[in-house]
Amino acid sequence: SFQLSARGHWSTWPAFASGQTVLKNHKPCCAPEERQSSNKQALLTFPKPRYLEQLESYLKKELQSLDLTKKNSQERKLQPYREIFEFFIDNFKTYKPLLSAIKNEYEVTLAHQKKTIRALEPLKAMVTTVSEECTRQILALQEKEKDEINMLKQEKQHLLKFIDKMKEEKNSLQTKVEHLQTSVAEEYAHYLNEYGARKLLLAKLNDMHNEQLDMTRHQVQDIKGEDVVKLTLALKVARQDLTKAQVKLNTMIADYEDVVPRRDFESLEKKYSDLLQEMKTLQKNFDQLHKEYETLLEIHRETAEERDNFCTELQRVQRNYTPRPNWPKCSEVIPGGADRWACLAEGKSSSQLVDVLLEEIGTGVLKDINVFPGWGKGDKVPVYLRHEGEVKNKKLTKKDVVNILKDIWKEKIALEQQTGKQSSLPEFFLSYLQKKYGDAAAMEWSYTLYENMRLCRSNHVLSSFYNILTGKVGEQQYHSQNQLISNLQKELAACDSSNSGSLTSKHMALREAFPLKRKESVQELLDASRYKLDNTEDLIDYISLFKEDEEGNAEPFVAKLRSQYVREKQEYLKQLKSKLGDVIEVKADDLKGAFCTIDPDIDDQTLDTYIGLAYQVRREQPGQEVVPVETALERLLAGDVRRVGPSPREGSTAGFEGE
């Protein structure tokens, strides 16, 4: 606290100091604490300089007039101090340049700091924004990973439980090992005691033996009266030998005190080895069971997923399925009423019932038609339908049609046996009608028979004749099925030694008649043969199984036999297609190789017949033609194609029909 005098020198305050103090006599490095103790009392006694009081009064007044609640209050508060400092500089002329430089440097520094603060304010806002974004991302990641963390926690708990279980098993095994060790220790102690007892017994025996020797010597000495000196020498030698033996015995006892007999050691070692091997086997079995358990868990999980998928699919199907038709309503429009419809619908599926219904409707409409429009005489029209103009409808019943078709088959077979040549069914069909009804009426019968066959697809006689007549199926297939049924009749008749016309299920000999059929197929035939019997009855009237009604409908047994024939042929050709692979076209040699692979017992004659069917050539013609696979399979499906021997995969129980 100094006051400047009128002459430009520093004046001191308080007044007890020297009136004028030159600056050079002042020690700027002197610490204020050194001057504080001497001037403390003076400060309390002497008043402040007037100029200092004016400056303090001005500063206090300016500070009181400021509103420090507004923005930039610190800068407002700094302004009075800046003005006081300027007054101070102006009054000190001598130090004004230095003080002005100091003030300017502070101002520049403050301006620089303000500029820096203003530059950092956007960064502060950006840092705040980035911090909020990072916080939000962290929260999102935490929320996203919460499920994974929970799953890992559950897996951790599961593994901890598994570890605890393994520890328990380890403790159990350790307990067993400790028990075995205890048993071994007990056995060892037992044998050690035996060993000690044996040593004591040997020592007693030695003592008794020595006593007996001494007594014998005394007796001998008394009897013979030997020399005392000699006996004394012998006694001395005996005692020396005894001492050596005792030393040797003590040495052996010290060396072999803790030794177990080799026999006992080997026995215990073998027992320990067996127990160790048993423990390893149990551990291996446990590991295997654990792997199987894990596998079963995985299978259970997959099965549960499949079950859920099937349930979902079932629900979807249940929502989308078509309601089953009310078939009994058809009895109201079918001639014959409910009884006839029940007879027609017995044992048939929905698809077959649709065919039956369409057949009944078609035959009903057919009876109302008086004439048929002719197909013309073009080359694409079958020979038995070539006619211009209208053709009269003969309005035949199904029974009449069946009788006519059976008679046609009978006449055709007789003609072929007589001439030895096979004729075409369409040409023979037309010639038969012309011969029996005349050329004028032949077309009427042909159109009527054709329309009845086309509509009545559920009747085997009509549908088989129609398929052969139109070329969908080969004629040989019809004869083959009839021959199959005929052979079976002969087999069953041969089994009926009493000619009673009945056989039990055990003596039906279906397995012998069809050695290549699967057990399921044979069981289906047995069930079809017993459809009229009660569960307690077992006597089957095999003759009635082959009967037909007046419309040519066979019994369920024969119908099942025919359906199995078609199904087994389809399975046979499916195996052939699978063997051929994804090829589009096939050569005859490749087709032969495929047949030989799936049917190793096939003979050359049958193989050439099948190749001829597939390539539409005779056996003597070379088979180098290439045909599409689908075409070859369609031709084989239309012909008489059957498995000759057992399947290489199924052996003698292959599910196909034999001769």
Image: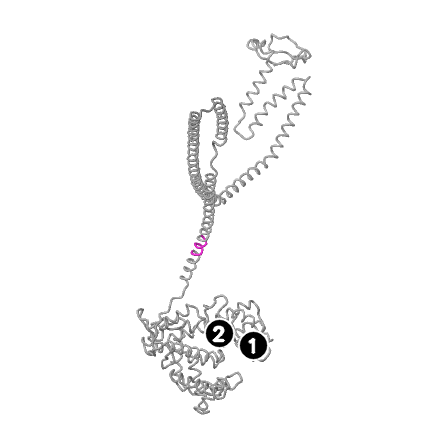
Front-lying residue, 174 or 163: 174
Left or right for 191, reference 592: left
Q: Estimate the x, y position of residue 578 in percent, counting from the top left.
A: 53, 67
Q: Amino acid at mark 2?
A: Arg
- Location of the N terminus by quadrant is top right
| Most common secondary structure along the magenta stretch | helix
Eye-nearest disc, 1 or 2 = 2
- Per the image, the residue denoted by label 2 is 642
What residue is at 59 percent from the left and 37 percent from the top?
Answer: 123
Q: Is residue 41 above or below residue 630?
A: above
Q: Is residue 304 one of those drawn in magenta?
A: yes
What residue is at 32 percent from the left and 73 percent from the top?
Answer: 539
Q: Is residue 331 above or below residue 200?
A: below
Front-lying residue, 106 or 387: 387
Q: Residues within 10 Å of mark 2 (few under 14, many from 20)?
A: many
Residues in magenta? 301-307
Mark 1 or mark 2: which comes first in sequence?
1
Q: Estimate the x, y position of residue 282 in percent, counting from the top left.
A: 45, 46
What residue is at 42 percent from the left and 58 percent from the top?
Answer: 312
Q: Quadrant of residue 3?
A: top right
Left or right for 186, reference 594: left
Q: Residues within 10 Å of mark 1 (few under 14, many from 20)?
A: many
Front-lying residue, 328 or 506: 506
- Per the image, the residue denoted by label 1 is 615
Left or right for 263, reference 26: left
